[in-house]
Amino acid sequence: MSLQSMTGFARHLRNSAGAQISWEIKSVNGKGLDVRFRLPAGFEAVEPKARALFNEHFKRGNFQAALSVDLSAGAAKATINQPLLKELAAIAAHLREEYGLAASTPEGLMALRGVMETPQEVTAPEHQVELERAILGILDETLIQLAHNRQAEGRALGEILTVQIAAIEMLVEQAKLDPSRSIEAIRARLAAQVALLLDAAPALDEARLHMEAAFLATKADIQEELDRLEMHIAAARTLLREGNGVGRKLDFLTQEFNREANTLCSKANAASITSIGLDLKAVVDQLREQIQNLE
């Protein structure tokens, strides 16, 4: 399955069941699945089934869903009672000639009762059921469209995440190959530390100082952190291949990335390693920011 972003928009309009029905849906980032509906009066009963459809299509995100139902789109047109209109016009003409009354106007005649016949919009129970079925069908189509839009954004986001994970891998490799971690550099650093202590306190036992320096050097070694970072890189790539619904797992993984980067900085005994650690923290922050958009 492909990655899916949590941001997206979809709008779908169709004439069905004697009405013009439209859904407009917006989605943004969210820790869970939260849907807020805006429904016209009389269609509140649609919400539970509509909410169930969201649960079928999505796992995370904050959604705003607006429904519009125009019943006039399928309603019968108003009609004019032609015989009655002709009869009233003849009576008006007779009264004008007989009594000198003002001429009647078309607007006045049309306003008389019975001339303009407008059908009453009464929704029968069976029609209401059909209408709600159509509303839910159009919602399902809109959610499919929204999912496609979110997947398109997810693909673009996946490319960004792939580049950022590659950047983390490159920094880990730089740390592994850093000259400060060579045997010669470690030996020279230990000798310098022991010599400094002996100069400050000649009475100290040199053998004991070498043991203490070696112990401190072991504690300062970052190989364990580098190994864990490589494991996290492999796990992140696996999750990206798995695709949809891995946002939470990747978010947790970035916390692990950050923890190892912090430890690497704290254990570093060379400026070059510290610099790599700070660059690593910056890339991890960027990675985590992008992952917040993933479902």
Image (cartoon, rainbow, N blue to C red):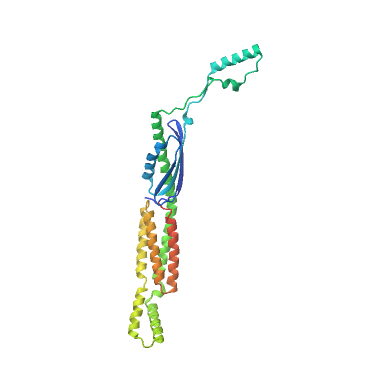
Identify the residue shown where x is 44% and y is 56%. 290
Identify the residue shown where x is 44% and y is 67%. 278
Outermost residue to the top = 98
Q: Is residue 172 visible?
A: no
Is residue 211 depicted above or below 56 in this figure?
below
Outermost residue to the bottom = 203
Identify the residue shown where x is 39% and y is 42%. 51
Q: Locate residue 96, reporting x and y percent.
A: 64, 14
User: Is residue 126 or residue 247 the one in the foreground?
Assistant: 126
Q: Locate residue 12, reporting x and y percent.
A: 45, 39
Q: Is residue 154 visible?
A: yes
Is residue 4 depicted above or below 163 in this figure?
above
Is residue 121 depicted above or below 58 in this figure?
above
Q: Does residue 96 appear left or right of residue 149 in this picture?
A: right
Is residue 288 depicted above or below 273 in this figure?
above
Quarter of the figure with residue 167: bottom left
User: Is residue 152 or residue 138 the one in the foreground?
Assistant: 138
Q: Does residue 79 appear left or right of residue 270 in this picture?
A: right
Q: How many marks?
A: 0
User: Is residue 274 or residue 174 the one in the foreground?
Assistant: 274
Q: Locate residue 9, reporting x and y percent.
A: 46, 45
Identify the residue shown where x is 61% and y is 15%. 92
Quarter of the figure with residue 36: top left
Outermost residue to the right = 100
Q: Locate residue 49, reporting x and y percent.
A: 37, 39
